[in-house]
Image: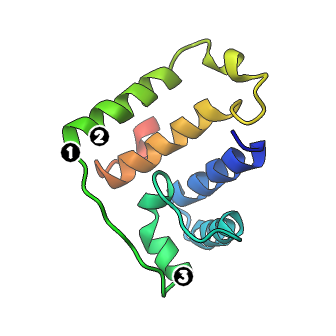
């Protein structure tokens, strides 16, 4: 667990990334650049799904793609997603400053996955 700004900044990045507003694309890039300042690499979600944005910020970056068994990946992500829907989880995580925003993070991460993997418009899905 890191400081709360870690998870909060990813939530903010994903909210802007999911927005249909074209101005939010630049905000996403600015926030992503701030979040990654000082880092040499990024792995896993949500960064692994932001390759176009990362390449725009870092055009000389190397992208390494690995392949995982789709069924194993689905099982893994389903376990995390199902845990985030437990009604009491927000209360349990409240005293943990680095994790108290985990449920909101999983929610916006689900929006990212819906947009990328399943082609779901995150905004119309709520209607």
- Quickly name the residue at label 3: 58
Within 10 angstroms of label 3, few (less than 14), some, or many (20 or more) residues?
few
- Quickly name the residue at label 2: 73
> Can residue 127 be seen?
no
Q: Nearer the viewer, residue 50 or 1?
A: 1
The residue that appears at 61% across and 18% down in the rendered structure is 89
Q: CA distance from mark 3 to mark 2?
A: 28 Å
Q: Earlier in the sequence, mark 3 or mark 2?
A: 3
Name the quadrant containing residue 26: bottom right
Mark 2: which secondary structure? helix
Within 10 angstroms of label 1, few (less than 14), some, or many (20 or more) residues?
few
| Residue 2 pos. (x, y %) | 72, 44
| Residue 45 pos. (x, y %) | 47, 51
| Residue 93 pos. (x, y %) | 69, 22
Q: Residue at the front extreme?
A: 40
Quadrant location, the N terminus: top right
**Are discs 2 and 1 less than 8 Å apart at CB?**
yes
Q: Nearer the viewer, residue 75 or 28?
A: 75
Q: Which mark is residue 121?
A: none
Q: CA distance from mark 2 to mark 1?
A: 6 Å
Q: Horizontal placement of 115 versus 30: left or right? A: left
Q: Earlier in the sequence, mark 3 or mark 1?
A: 3
């Amino acid at each position: 667990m890191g400081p709360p700004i870690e998870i909060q900044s990813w939530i903010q990045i994903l909210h802007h990334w999911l927005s249909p507003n074209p101005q939010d694309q630049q905000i996403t890039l600015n926030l992503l650049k701030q979040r990654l300042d000082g880092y040499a690499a990024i792995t896993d979600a949500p960064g692994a799904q932001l390759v176009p944005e990362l390449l725009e910020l870092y055009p000389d970056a190397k992208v390494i793609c690995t392949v995982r068994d789709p069924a194993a990946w689905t099982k893994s992500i389903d376990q995390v997603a199902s845990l985030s829907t437990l009604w009491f989880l927000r209360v349990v995580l409240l005293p943990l400053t680095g994790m108290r925003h985990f449920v909101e993070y999983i929610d916006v991460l689900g929006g990212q996955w819906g947009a990328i993997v399943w082609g779901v418009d995150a905004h119309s899905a709520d209607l």
